[in-house]
Image (cartoon, rainbow, N blue to C red):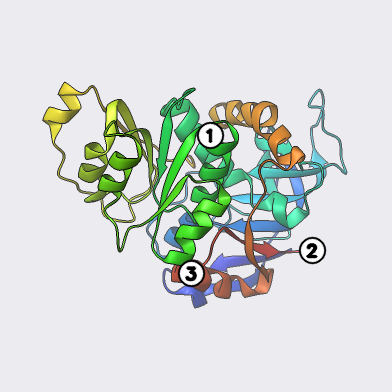
Amino acid sequence: MRAIEITQPGKPEVLQLCERPTPELKAGEVLIKVHAAGINRPDVFQRLGQYPVPPGASDLPGLEVAGEIVDGDLADSGFKKGDMVCALVQGGGYAEYCAAPLAQCLPVPAGLSMVEAASLPETFFTVWSNVFDRAQLSDGETLLVQGGTSGIGVTAIQLATAMGHRVFATAGTEDKRRACEELGAERGINYRDEDFVKVVKELTGGKGVDVVLDMVAGDYVGREIDCLADDGRIAIIALLGGAKANVDLSQVLRRRLTISGSTLRPRPVAFKGAIARNLRERVWPLLESGKIKPVIYQTFPLAQAAEAHALMESSTHVGKIVLQVV
C-alpha cells in the first residue's frame, strides 16, 4: 500500500511517500480502506520527534480516518464488511489501509462526505472526554475555549453551544474572532488586542466561567484561574505555550478549583470505546440533523502531506485539514 512515513525528525519535507505492507490485524481490530485521513497537531509533534509513538502502534502518522471496512472479525458488532466508518486510531492513518480497533469505529453520519467524516474522530473524542467527562460541563454552565478556530476549538464551540451552554472563545485575529462567533460562540476574544480575563469577567457579571478548555498552558494557566468561577475546572489538553506555569494555589484551595490534564492517544481501547458509545448516542444525531457541521479548511492528496503540515504549522486555517486518499 502507499503510505506517508516520517523519514527523520524535522520539517514538513521529511514526510515522504513510501510503500508499506498492508497492516496485520490484532484481536478486536478491523482493516479500513482509507478514503480520507484527518491532520492534527499531534501529527506535527510526532514529525518533529516530540510525541513518542505508543508501544505497539504504527510508526506512520495519522490519528483519524474514514473509509470502508474490508476485513476483521465483525461478529455481534453491528458492522459488516463494506460499511463506511470513521475511526480513531493510535497511528497509521496516512495510508491506503489502516488497522483500527472496532470499538473506536463509528458509522459515517448520514449526509456527510468521507472527507467530513475523517475530520471528526480526534477532535470529537478529545472534546467529549475532556469537556464533558473530565471537566463535567453541566446544565447552565459556561465554557471558555482557548484557540477557538483550531480543529478542537471548532468542535468544542459547536458541541457546547448545541448542548445549550454559553461559550466564549479566544483567537488571534479579527477574522478568526468573528469565525468563532459564526460557529456559535457568544463572544470571540482577540487575545492580541483584549485581555480574555477581563472580557470573561464582564460577560459573566464578575462570576467567571465554569470550565476552560486549554491547549495553550504555560502562563495562560494563572490567568485562567483568575477567570474561573468558584468550583471551576481547567482541562489542559496541550502545551503550546509551555509546560511550566505559576499558579496561585491559594485560589485553588479557597475557591475549590480543579486543574486536570490528559492525552488521549495512550489510553486503552476500552476507555476510547466508552467515548465512542457516548458520541454515537449523544453527538451523532446532532451531526445528522445539521446542528453541528464539520468545518473543512482545505484538503490535500496523500502525496502532499508535507504541504498539509506546512499549512497546519502556519496556523492560518479555521477548522480541519484533511488528506484525501481515494
Residue 128, numbered circle? 1
Residue at 30% from the left image edge and 41% from the top image edge: 202
Observer-nearest of 192 and 113 = 192
The N terminus lies in which quarter of the figure?
A: bottom right
Residue at 55% from the left image edge and 38% from the top image edge: 161
Q: Residue 95: x, y in percent?
A: 68, 60
Earlier residue among tags 2 and 3: 3
Q: Which residue is mark 3?
A: 316
The C terminus lies in which quarter of the figure?
A: bottom right
Q: Label 1 amino acid?
A: Trp
Question: What separation in Å lies between label 3 and label 1 (alpha carbons)?
Answer: 25 Å
Q: Residue 60's quadrant in the figure?
A: bottom right
Residue 167 sits above or below residue 94 on the image: above
Question: What separation in Å lies between label 2 and label 3 (alpha carbons)?
Answer: 26 Å
Q: Which residue is mark 2?
A: 326
Q: Label 3 amino acid?
A: Thr
Q: Nearer the viewer, mark 3 or mark 1?
A: 3
Q: Residue 45's quadrant in the figure?
A: bottom left
Earlier residue among tags 2 and 1: 1
Residue 145 sits above or below residue 50 on the image: above
Helix, strand or loop at label 3? It is: loop
Q: Residue 86: x, y in percent?
A: 71, 45
Q: Label 2 amino acid?
A: Val
Observer-nearest of 242 and 152 = 152
Residue at 45% from the left image edge and 71% from the top image edge: 314
Image-based side of 229 in relation to 251, left or right: right
Residue 244 sits above or below residue 47 on the image: above
Observer-nearest of 79 and 249 = 249
Earlier residue among tags 3 and 1: 1
| Within-10-Å neighbours for mark 2: few <14, some 14–19, many 20+ | few
Residue at 81% from the left image edge and 46% from the top image edge: 111
